[in-house]
Image (cartoon, grey):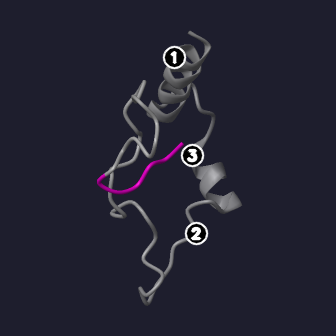
Amino acid sequence: MHFVGADQLHGFDERLTSDIYPGDFAWAADWDARAHRDANGPSMARMAGLCTGSVRLDYDEQVTERACA
């Protein structure tokens, strides 16, 4: 769950992990920009190659572990 804003609990008693994204909209796309880059297009996947690990995979594993606990 990606919580945005000052209240990072949103009705829950505690957070089991931090969030992978900052608590503001700095990571969101700027739809008013003149030029857009498609970071999710097939050409980007070809350029990236095989993924052997990433901060997002590590984060997902941490969230899964804490949710199961």
Q: CA distance from mark 2 to mark 1?
A: 33 Å
Q: Are marks 3 and 2 in contact (CB under 8 Å)?
A: no
| Residue where numbered disc 1 is placed | 66
Amino acid on which disc 3 is placed: Ala
Horizontally, is 49 left or right of 59 in the view?
Answer: right
Q: Residues within 10 Å of mark 1 (few under 14, many from 20)?
A: few
Q: CA distance from mark 3 to mark 2?
A: 14 Å
Q: Residues within 10 Å of mark 2 (few under 14, many from 20)?
A: few
Viewer-closest of 6 and 50 = 6
Extreme-right residue of the structure:
42
Q: Indicate the position of residue 66 as horizontal and vertical percent values.
A: 51, 16
| Residue where numbered disc 2 is placed | 38
| Residue where numbered disc 3 is placed | 48
Horizontally, is 7 left or right of 36 in the view?
Answer: left
Q: Indicate the position of residue 44 as horizontal and vertical percent values.
A: 60, 57
- Frontmost of labels 2 and 1 is 1
Q: Residue at x 52, y 24 (%)?
A: 63
Asked which secondary structure carries label 1, the reply is: helix
Q: Residue at x 50, y 35 (%)?
A: 56
- What residue range appears in magenta? 1-6
Residue 22 among those drawn in magenta: no
Amino acid on which disc 2 is placed: Asp
Sequence-wise first label, 2 or 1: 2
**Number of marks in the image?**
3
Q: Quadrant of residue 43?
A: bottom right
